[in-house]
Amino acid sequence: MGKAKVFSTHPLFEEARAILDADCEVEYWARPERPTSQEVFQRVKDKEGLICLLTDRVGDDLLRAAPKLRIVANVAVGYDNVDVASCTKRGVVATNTPGVLDETTADFAWALMMAISRRLVEGDAYARSGNWKGWNLDQFCGTDVWGKTLGIIGLGRIGRAFARRAAGFKMHVLYNSTKRAPEEIERELNAEYRDLNALLAESDFVSLHVPLNSETRGLLDAPKFFRMKPTAFVINTARGPVIDEAALVHALEAGKIAGAALDVFEQEPFIHPGLKRPNVVMAPHMGSASVETRSKMAAMAAHNVAALFRGQRPPNMLNPEALQSA
Ligand code: GLV
């Protein structure tokens, strides 16, 4: 039996390629631009494995066009781009990359919170502009982070990693989650549960750490922004559609909240023009983007694919039941 044929929509990193190439015959997408969905369809139709990024939509139409497919390995922890139910129905295993990016993403959310509150991006632009005439008492005064109330929405792995950072800043930590965390976690994080409306009303910083699904789409909408303090900031490193972006722009324009720091957007790479304002800090979806972490994510996806074709259980299956129906 020959090696399993796999298509990877990205060239990946060395470690991942070494893992894959031992067990699979991999066609790597090598062009700098992302493949169109037609290009993915074309390449995947005779493949048994697909390694994809969060920008690749894997729907039932793609699965139907690739009848030999046995695994879809998403190089991301979030998997809203993959129709997992269709994968299961067709006996295709779907995997993601949980755990390896928690601290890196929490670091980045923290950096965004610091940047928006202390006006770092505005200050950087001014320092570079050549217009700085010298220190002044009321120049670029921002808002303290330390000692404030931090509201975390979603206390999964990344939410907890984010919460742990609050201790050094002497913050009061609140959280909201679909399930209340076990008491020992609340104690370890010094975090108090609040219902969503209470969390929004009390927090100086609200940070999102939920996956995108039918319950979280549009979670922060106009009525929710209305509940927040006019001095509060929102931070989003989760998924863009968790925020109703038009409502956010309106809340910023109307002074319902003080600002936002965003790594993700409703229709990436499109950015609502109303977000291009001084009290918004933006990043192009780079929360997990450290060399170490992105390399680990790719290796994890490679391990999942290699395991399946070696007759083992992929370690990060989202639908273990797919193995039974295969
Ligand atoms: C990145 O956004 C991820 O889900 O891993």
Image (spheres, helix red, strand yellow):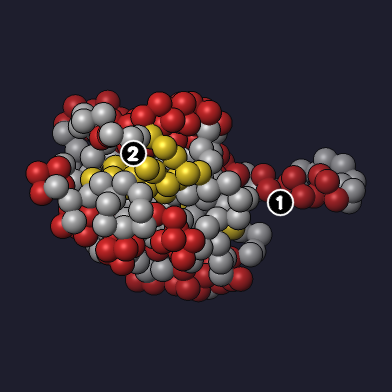
Report the residue at 56% width, 66% height from top: 270
Q: Is residue 244 above or below residue 4?
A: below
Picture quarter containing residue 161? top left
Give whichever of discs 2 and 1 has the lower sequence position: 2
Which disc number belongs to residue 4? 2
Establish whether ligand 1 lies closer than 8 Å to the Cβ of label 1.
no
Name the side, left or right, on which 182 lies relative to 279.
left
Give the number of callouts.
2
Establish whether ligand 1 lies closer than 8 Å to the Cβ of label 2.
no
Report the residue at 42% width, 37% height from top: 25
Q: Which residue is mark 1?
A: 122
Query: Callout 2: 10 Å neighbours few (<14), some, many (20+)?
Result: some
Picture quarter containing residue 61? bottom left
Q: Amino acid at mark 2?
A: Ala
Residue 101 shows in this picture: no
Q: Amino acid at mark 1?
A: Glu
